[in-house]
Image (tube, rainbow, N blue to C red):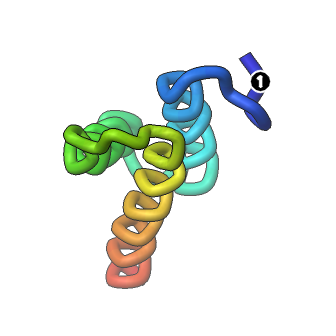
Amino acid sequence: MSCTDPETEFEALVYLADRLRLRFPEVEEDAVFALIAEELESFDGARLRDYVPVLVEHNVLRRLRAVHHQGA
């Protein structure tokens, strides 16, 4: 497994979860996983899967930033 070139969508999502937990330590681990799962589900019918982890990351970051800025 390589964080810079994951071989599978699953690997990319594992690295995404790790990065998000480091970037947002105030957010509980279960909440990070739940956000990733929700966003991943929204791409459930996508035929082209290559960009799904990037799109999931974008959407989860947007949601986390919105919550983080509201609490600041």
Quarter the N terminus occupies = top right
Q: Is residue 3 visible?
A: yes
Q: Which residue occupies 34% across, 67% down?
A: 63
Where residue 49 appears, as percent x and y from the top left, is 43, 39
The one of 46 and 61 positioned closer to us in this rendering: 46
Q: Which residue occupies 49% across, 44% down?
A: 53
Q: Crowdedness of circle 1 by 10 Å Cα count: few (<14), some, many (20+)? A: few
Quarter the C terminus occupies = bottom left
Q: Which residue occupies 22% across, 39% down?
A: 44
Q: Where is mark 1, residue-wise?
A: 2
Q: Is residue 42 above or below residue 11?
A: below
Q: Quadrant of residue 65?
A: bottom left
Q: Secondary structure at mark 1?
A: loop
Q: Which residue occupies 29% across, 44% down?
A: 46
Q: Of all residues shown, which one is farthest toward the front?
A: 47
Q: Of all residues shown, which one is farthest toward the top?
A: 1
The one of 1 and 50 positioned closer to us in this rendering: 50
Q: Is residue 9 left or right of residue 37?
A: right
Where residue 48 appears, as percent x and y from the top left, is 41, 42
Numbered circles on residues, count = 1
Q: Is residue 25 left or right of residue 66?
A: right
Q: Quadrant of residue 30?
A: top left
Q: Is residue 71 left or right of residue 10?
A: left
Where residue 8 appears, as percent x and y from the top left, is 56, 22
